[in-house]
Amino acid sequence: MNSSTHAPTMRHKRLAVVSTFIALVFLSLFYLSSHDSLYSPIPEPEIISEDPQQTGDPALPSSYAEFDFSLPKEKLAAELFSFPRSSRPKWLSTPAPQSPLVFRIAIITHPRDFDKRDAVRKYTLSNVPTSACKFSYRFILGYGNEAEDKLVLEEMHKYGDIVRLDMKEDKRRMGEKRWRMLRWAAEEHRGPYDYFLSLDTDAFVRLHALALRTRAMHPEFKPREESIMWAQVQEHKVHFVANPVDNEETVLLEDDKVFKPEEFNGPVWYPYPIGFAYLMSSHLVARLMDPEVKLAHHVSFPSDDVMVGMWVSEWATDTKVIRDKTGFHDPPGHNYHPEDTEPITWDSVVLHHVAPWEFRELRRVKEWKGEWLKTI
């Protein structure tokens, strides 16, 4: 072939190669930018608190010993209570049972809630008589920021009552946190128990009264042999389906959100416990934590209590559900929705949206004298 005709052909080939290379570079840049936009971090959901007493995050000291847990000298308004003299229930005066109920208590908390954990220890869990109930408890939390984590570590060494999960605190991972709380209850090696009690750190519980009332209302219940869920209850219909490896320790896999075909057309179809406090029988916990059961929990869904109801509806359809708004509720003025509050009575065994100073005052209620062995 003649060299004069060969040269232009070679130049054309080189130009074609260069053009192809440039086109590939631009396509790659376009793909990367679009890929980043498709897989950018999930925006933090805006969670509207129902607690009118919620305040901003307090400044933290340099060590746990420097915390000032002193409380304001306030009193609870008389209008919060309703204790007619003739209304004292018989179950509060019943003789101690031969075998007290055994509670396993998990208190869901955030690293920064130091004052709330202090109030729970001092005013609800201390000096509880063992005649009606016995219990073990743990605060369950993940990692916060560096300053919080340092103080939590000191708190752990001081009290030995904190389980720190290997996960970062994130409102989008609350379903996973609830799942881990159940797993803790199932795996805690402290012998047999009757009920798992889940609590928020702003929930004031009268454990002695809770045990007596639970037995009096349903003496036929056998929590070690049957599935029971007891709480203030609402209904929902959101449904998530677990992927095959959903019980693995990973946050990289998310469940698919799948709705039943008729779901949006019909009524709600399962009850769920409002998350500030609920009881589950040990039998129900064991069923949900069976290795063959795959609970959808890697879900970016802030209503973790709804997921608890979903798990029960899918895997334990024969569960006995006790709807107890009389016993589990917000006091008046402690919720933005007045219709969701109830006066404090003899039956108020768990109260929600309670500030630390209110824990102290509730412990002092004279009608509840004897439910703790020591007055404050």
Image (cartoon, rainbow, N blue to C red):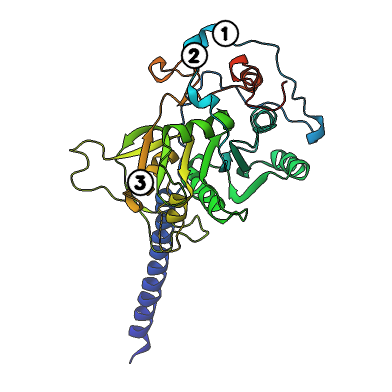
Type of residue at label 2? Gly
Q: Which mark is residue 92?
A: none
Q: Quadrant of residue 221?
A: top left
Q: Position of residue 39 (x, y in %)?
A: 43, 51
Q: What residue is at 35 percent from the left and 51 percent from the top?
A: 316
Query: Which label belongs to residue 333?
Result: 2
Residue positioned 50% across, 39% down in the render: 171
Q: Residue at x 77, y 29 (%)?
A: 67
Give the number of the mark in front: 3 or 2. Answer: 3
Query: Looking at the rendered structure, which numbered label has been put on residue 319?
Result: 3
Marks 1/2: CA distance? 10 Å
Residue 66 in the figure: left or right of residue 177: right
Q: Earlier in the sequence, mark 1 or mark 3?
A: 1
Q: Contact (CB < 8 A) between labels 3 and 2?
A: no
Quickly name the residue at label 1. 77
Q: Does any portion of residue 158 appear in the rendered image?
A: yes
Picture layout, residue 145 above or below residue 204: below
Are the residues flagged by discs 1 and 2 in contact, CB closer than 8 Å?
Answer: yes
Q: Earlier in the sequence, mark 3 or mark 2?
A: 3
Given residues 164 and 61, the one toward you in this image is 164
